[in-house]
Image: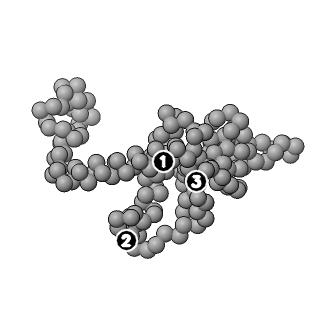
Amino acid sequence: MDTYSVNISDAADAVADEFDCVIRPVSAGTPQEMGHAEGAVGELRRMTRATFAAAPHLDPTKYWGLADEWNTWVHYILPGRDRGKSAYEICEGRKPNLKNLFIKTFGCPVTFKPMKGTPGHSTNKNMPLTVDGYFLGMQWPMVLVLRKSDSKVVHTVLVHTSCLNKGAQRIN
């Protein structure tokens, strides 16, 4: 909780008592710390807005959270302009292998093979094995894809990507 203890409601105290917990508010931080945190949030918002500018076929009201999650991952892996190393390099002590980390453009067209037990998977030999959709991120070891046919988000195993969005770069 980021508030003073005088602002904690009686209802919050009752819930904490019910679960035998103690609410301890955190300090607000110095103005410099708050400015750094707000700068990071602003950078994430700029990245997410740019993501949707490059993927106009996606509805921001539905997929903003996934875009935030993906851009946070990309920001963690790729070095920033103001620092020489990425956060990944600082934490892990080595450069990331970008081929293994599967950095793709959010919203790029993909062709995928649905996993067993997911919608779209078929054992019928006469049905096509792959389905077209849009890349929405990772939930390791699975890939999130928005299926074009019915606009449902499914977990898949990726077969092939073709990032053909305007201005999109393919990072392999």
Q: Position of residue 117 (x, y in %)?
A: 68, 42
Q: Amino acid at mark 3?
A: Gly
* SS for dot 1: helix
Q: Secondary structure at mark 3?
A: loop
Q: Secondary structure at mark 2?
A: loop
Mark 2 Cα-neighbour bin, 10 Å: few <14, some 14–19, many ≥20: few
Tell whether 135 sits left or right of 46: right
Q: Are marks 3 and 2 in contact (CB under 8 Å)?
A: no
Q: Is residue 66 above or below residue 96?
A: above
Disc nearer the start of the sequence (3/2): 2
Tell me where residue 4 sits by quadrant: top left
* 9 over 157 or under it: above or below: above
> Which residue is rendered at x = 54% and y = 66% of the image?
98
Residue at position x 26%, y 54% from top?
Answer: 36
Between the C-alphas of marks 3 and 2, the distance is 25 Å
Q: Looking at the figure, which quarter contains the N terminus?
A: top left
Question: What mark, if any, has residue 50 been given in the picture?
Answer: 1
Name the disc covering residue 76, or none.
none
Nearest the viewer among 86 and 141 is 86
Q: Is residue 141 visible?
A: no
Which residue corresponds to the image point at 71% horizontal and 45% vertical from the top-left? 132
Percent x, y for residue 25?
18, 42
Nearer-the-camera pick, 26 or 83 = 83
Is residue 164 visible in the rendered image? The answer is yes
> Which residue is under mark 3?
167
Q: CA distance from mark 1 to mark 3?
A: 11 Å
- Residue with the mark numbered 2: 84
Residue 113's place in the image compared with 21, above or below, is below
